[in-house]
Image (tube, rainbow, N blue to C red):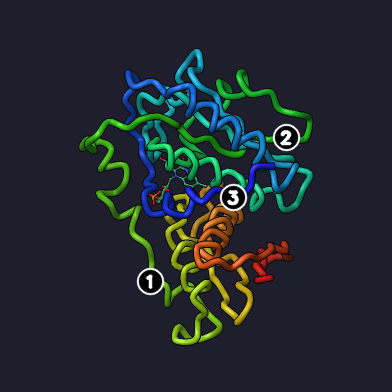
Amino acid sequence: MTTISPAWYPAINARRARRAYDKSKTIGTEVKNRLHEVCNEFRPYPDVRVEFVSEPPYDIFANALGFYGNIKGAPAFLAFVGDMSDPNVQEKMGYTGEAAVLEATAQGLGTCWVALTYNAKAVKSLVKLGQTEKLICVSPVGYTTGTWSFEEKAFSGFGIYHQRNPLSTMVSGLPESGWPDWAKAAVEAARLAPSAMNRQPWSFHVEKDRITVAIKNRGMEFNVAKRLDCGIAMLHIQLGALSCGAQGKWALLKSPQLARFQIE
Ligand SMILES: Cc1cc2nc3c(=O)[nH]c(=O)nc-3n(C[C@H](O)[C@H](O)[C@H](O)COP(=O)(O)O)c2cc1C
């Protein structure tokens, strides 16, 4: 199994949801192989998987304009697939999928988690699903058009959808002055996690040797599970902790709590 890559933590800061791609810039074989490797081998939870599809025969984002996000020119995509018979499928999907997103970012590629504005039928003709599996999300993958077009800026709310709430609104437990270094790095990294409509539906309870993630009930669902966003934040927590040399393990919990990261 491919373990966590040291390239993923710095990618947290570099990542932005990108929606305009330069189709003429092809993804090289080495980079493609690395993405396939991460998708095939980073499988901490066997009931979710990520498939990397390069050069699809048609554009899965064409004519899929919803109330937000219009993805243009992506030469490849990631499909995030989970077994819906597992009650923890959403957080497992977020955690696993974000690894592929951060690997793509580390390789200089643009991505954007997309739950709503794509052609699911087109994806399902290319990615075969098992009986209990569901296509949960996709992400375009490709080199972006160097500058941000007006349209792309508009779809990111002119930067508003990238802004995050202050840590003080999402962290409880030990006072900030008492946070160990690993916990500070972990919650700072979690705060930067992407979420549907940038709703940031999480809270983090910090203790001396553990962080518990819970879901915030306030805020819209938008037909996208908040547990998915929280799963993305889980990977960021682990990467932040690891950046300070702190190894730990996740335990999945019952709602409204979601998961606990315990330092070893
Ligand atoms: C689970 C999930 C679903 C998303 N769905 C869409 C979508 O359907 N269309 C879209 O344009 N952006 C979508 N986004 C992108 C978010 O709007 C974006 O990540 C968020 O505004 C934060 O901005 P940032 O990624 O630049 O930090 C989604 C993000 C997540 C995590």
Task: Give the left or right position of residue 147, taking residue 170 as reference.
Answer: left
What amino acid is found at the position of numbered circle 3 in the picture?
Ile
Q: Residue at x 26, y 42 (%)?
A: 154
Looking at the image, is 236 positioned above or below residue 33? below
Name the residue beneath numbered marker 1. 166
Give the SS element for disc 2.
Answer: strand
Front-lying residue, 140 or 219: 140
Task: Give the left or right position of residue 65, taking residue 218 as reference.
Answer: left
Q: Residue 91: where, in percent of width, then height?
A: 64, 53
Q: How many residues crowd around disc 3 within 10 Å: few (fewer than 14), some, or many (20 or more)?
A: some
Q: How many residues crowd around disc 2 within 10 Å: few (fewer than 14), some, or many (20 or more)?
A: some
Q: Which quadrant would the N terminus be assigned to in this image?
A: top right
Which sits earlier in the primary sequence, circle 3 or circle 1? 3
Give the SS element for disc 1.
Answer: loop
Q: Which mark is residue 35?
A: none
Q: Which quadrant would the C terminus be assigned to in this image?
A: bottom right
Distance of mark 1 from mark 2, alpha carbons? Answer: 37 Å
Label 3 with label 1: CB-CB less than 8 Å: no
Quadrant of residue 253 in the image? bottom right
**Direction top: furthest residue:** 57
Distance of mark 3 from mark 2, alpha carbons? Answer: 25 Å
Name the residue beneath numbered marker 3. 4
Q: Which mark is residue 133?
A: 2
What amino acid is found at the position of numbered circle 1 in the picture?
Pro
Q: Residue at x 48, y 15 (%)?
A: 58
Q: Residue 257: where, in percent of width, then height?
A: 66, 68
Q: Residue at x 54, y 46 (%)?
A: 98
